[in-house]
Structures are given as structure tokens and as C-alpha cells.
Image (cartoon, rainbow, N blue to C red):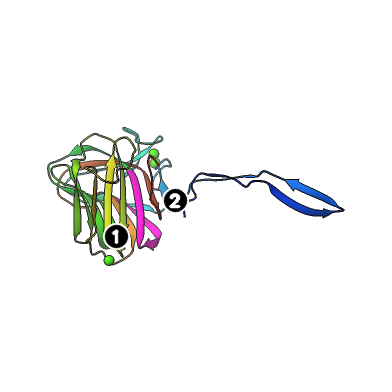
Amino acid sequence: MRRKLLVSLIGLVVAFACVGATLVIRGPRILVSSVSYIHEQNFETTGAPSLWSASGTVDWDYTTTVLQGSESMFVDTSATKEYAILTLAAAYNEIWGYFLLRMPVVEGLSRDFVYLKATASTQGGIRRNSDGTVRVANGAGVATTVATLDVSTTYHVWFYFNETTNTSNVAFSTDGTRPTSGDNFAETTSGNANTDVDVFEFGGVTSTSTHSFIFDRVLFDDEQIGNSP
Ligand SMILES: [Ca+2]
Ligand SMILES: [Ca+2]
Ligand SMILES: [Ca+2]
């Protein structure tokens, strides 16, 4: 789906045009295509963007601490479920995701903050554990990072879900470089997700304790999303 920023030089286009006996030589031509994703959301417009809705209160136009552009999305939860919901037009067996995240308030308990769902059925998710480490789930299969997600720090977060291979992973960094191993990466290959996913929830998707979340630049694609996308 994604067409990377592609500048391809189509060499010399040689056209033999039968204009009398004239040989016409044209070129070179430069084709430029823009980046496209399955979904890209920067929350720059006012209110809930297309395909997004809220369960509880979601601030779609947050400006106190902005992670990208002029506005971010903010969910301030107490011990209730409050989250933003993205519903894609199709369900995906395999999908890559990315978002910017900052948590201004973190209480001691663990909290799931991303769910991947098949309509209402949770197939996977991302949790911040009480010690700050991050757990990724594919059905009942889980893996946990060594590194911690700290309060009031802006992170780049990447994740992957595959229903067939039962594999999910999560990675995060503060500098935009995507970890593929090490303390800031965790992967499970022994999950049991069993349905393609089309609904994605961001925020307080479980009801344990008070957390607040700033999200921005949410991307989904059908191939790996790279550094500082
Ligand atoms: Ca933004
Ligand atoms: Ca907005
Ligand atoms: Ca499966």
C-alpha cells in the first residue's frame, strides 16, 4: 500500500514517432509519488477525525503539550475505561503500527493502553506494567521489554501484529530510531489471536488506575514502518 517517497529516474524515454522519417527522443522523466499508509492521523483537524470515535472523554484538539504539528489527542483517565477508537474499513491479518506517546500522569498499577480488536473481540494489545516495562500481547501470548516507559517523556512506539504466525512485537525509543532487539523491544511468537483486526483503541482501555495519555501521528501500514516516520 505504501508508496515510499520515490524519485525514480526513468532513464531516457525513446519514442519512435513516425513523423515522416523523424526519430523523436524524449526524456529523462522524473516520477514523484507521496508516502501513503493504510491510515495516517495527526489530529490536526478539529474534533474527532474520520474513522475515529470516543468512549468516554477524548480531547481531539489538545495543545498543552503537542507531540507533532499543532494539535495532539489526549485521554485523561481515572479508574474508568476512556479511550479513542479507530475503526478501519477492512480487517487485517497482518499489520504494522506506529504512534507518538507521552504519559503526563502514571499511577502505580499496570494499564493496557492499546487494544487491537476484531470488532469487539480483543486480539492483542500493549500494556504499561506497574514497573514501567511494556508488555505486548497476541491473544494469550505475551512478551515484556526490559526498558521502561517513563512519565512525561515523549516516545516513538512501533508495534506489529500477525494473526497467522501468532506473532506480535512492540518497540519504543525517544530518538525516533526503531529498536529491532534489545531492552526496548519485545516479541511473542506464541500467541493465539484467531481473527483479523479492524478496531484499534488508544488510551485507558482497562479500568485500573489514573493515567493520562497524549497520542499523535498514529500510523498503520501493511509493511514495516521505519525510523521517524
Ligand atoms: Ca499532531
Ligand atoms: Ca485536532
Ligand atoms: Ca492465530
Any mark on residue 179, and which?
none
Lower position in the chain sequence, tag 2 or tag 1? 2
Q: Which residue is mark 1?
A: 117
Mark toward the viewer: 2 or 1: 2
**Are dots 2 and 1 in contact, CB under 8 Å?**
no
In the image, residue 132 above or below residue 192:
above
Instruction: State whether label 2 is within 8 Å of ligand 1.
Output: no
Q: Position of residue 45 (x, y in %)?
A: 43, 42
Position above or below: 193 against 179: below
**Residue at image location 27% in from the left, 49% down from the top:** 170
Query: In this orientation, does residue 56 appear?
Result: no
Other residues around mark 2 within 10 Å, as few (<14) / some (14–19) / many (≥20)? some
Please give left or right for residue 50 compared with residue 20 in the image: left
Q: Looking at the rendering, which quadrant does residue 29 occupy?
A: top right
Nearest the camera: 205 or 154? 154
Amino acid type at mark 1: Lys
Instruction: Name the residue nearer the viewer: 223 or 43.
Output: 223
Q: Which residue is mark 2?
A: 37
Residue 97 is covered by the magenta coloring = yes
The quarter of the image holding the C terminus is: top left
> Is label 2 in a helix, a strand or a loop?
loop
Which segment is the magenta one?
84-99
